[in-house]
Image (tube, rainbow, N blue to C red):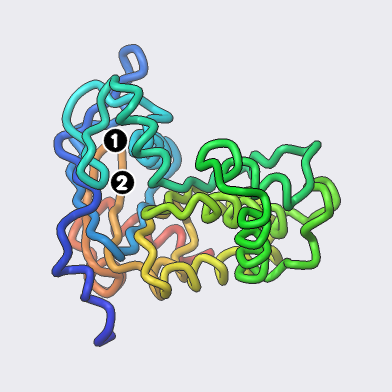
Amino acid sequence: MTNKPIYEEQEPIIKCHDVHKWYGDFHVLRGIDMNVRKGEVVVIFGPSGSGKSTFIRTLNRLEEHQRGQIIVDGVELTHDIKNIEAIRKETGMVFQQFNLFPHLTVMQNITLAPLQVKKVNKVEAEKTAMELLERVGIPEQADKFPGQLSGGQQQRVAIARALAMKPKIMLFDEPTSALDPEMIKEVLDVMIGLAKSGMTMIVVTHEMGFARSVADTLYFFDEGQIVETGSPEEIYNNPQEDRTKLFLSQILQH
């Protein structure tokens, strides 16, 4: 693991301090502190309802935090629309559901945002899209519609679409949880390649094999708090908190 800790010398590209969120009376995030450095791969895991997805969605303002501070690549997330737009341009997101436009081809799905948001010319946008489809292993699907693809292929298109905006950071919110088991590996393989290329990634997932092989840092969430954080070796081999031990014993049996 000699080549990995280069990111440790980097300034944090994401800084979260004392982040809180409520839904009415329900206190869903309770003081989250997290720094993510450029090139770092962070995996967030924990039981359902622990605030993982809500937290990752606050990083590009799909959810609004009510207290604390979130700074992404030097820009603080506030109500300022310009700041939100600046951060969303730097931050790609891949969801549990693929969220592809069903009436557009794969190529059109991938080129839509670069054409409209970044004003890239069509030839360049399509060239980049084909390179990304090669990268995710499905160049032959460019002219098909999402409904003609398997779930794993659709999720790989969704990753290519996010990468088409040339983001500095990629957020993944349980990207394999809607997939059949035989399709999970093909999506994780793309994500592993992305991690090895030096992309800054925050991944909410239950795929602990992926976490073990790729993550630099793991965060265990429960009841809206970070219960424990550490390297995969520390968390797997020597978890400190009873809640972490219990959760790992439950999911690693399956």
Compared to residue 61, the image places residue 140 above or below, namely below
Disc assigned to residue 224? 1
| Image quarter of residue 190 | bottom right
**Residue 109 appears in view:** yes
Amino acid found under the numbered disc labelled 2: Phe
Name which residue lies at 19% across and 45% down. Answer: 15
- Rate crowding at label 1 as few (under 14), some (14 to 19) or many (20 or more) other CA atoms within 10 Å: many
Q: Quadrant of the C terminus?
A: bottom right
Between 9 and 124, the residue placed more toward the observer is 124
Q: Which residue is mark 2?
A: 221
Q: Secondary structure at mark 1?
A: loop
Q: Position of residue 93 (x, y in %)?
A: 48, 46
Instruction: Tell whether label 2 touches label 1 (CB within 8 Å).
Output: yes
* Left-right relation of 238 to 110: left
Q: Position of residue 187 (x, y in %)?
A: 60, 63
Name which residue lies at 25% across and 68% down. Answer: 231
Compared to residue 227, the image places residue 116 above or below, namely above
The number of numbered badges drawn on the structure is: 2
Name which residue lies at 20% across and 43% down. Answer: 74
| Image quarter of residue 5 | bottom left
* Left-right relation of 66 to 101: left
Name which residue lies at 35% across and 67% down. Answer: 215
Between 65 and 221, the residue placed more toward the observer is 65
Q: Position of residue 200 (x, y in %)?
A: 35, 60
* Left-right relation of 211 to 177: left
Q: Position of residue 57 (x, y in %)?
A: 40, 36
Between 27 and 184, the residue placed more toward the observer is 184
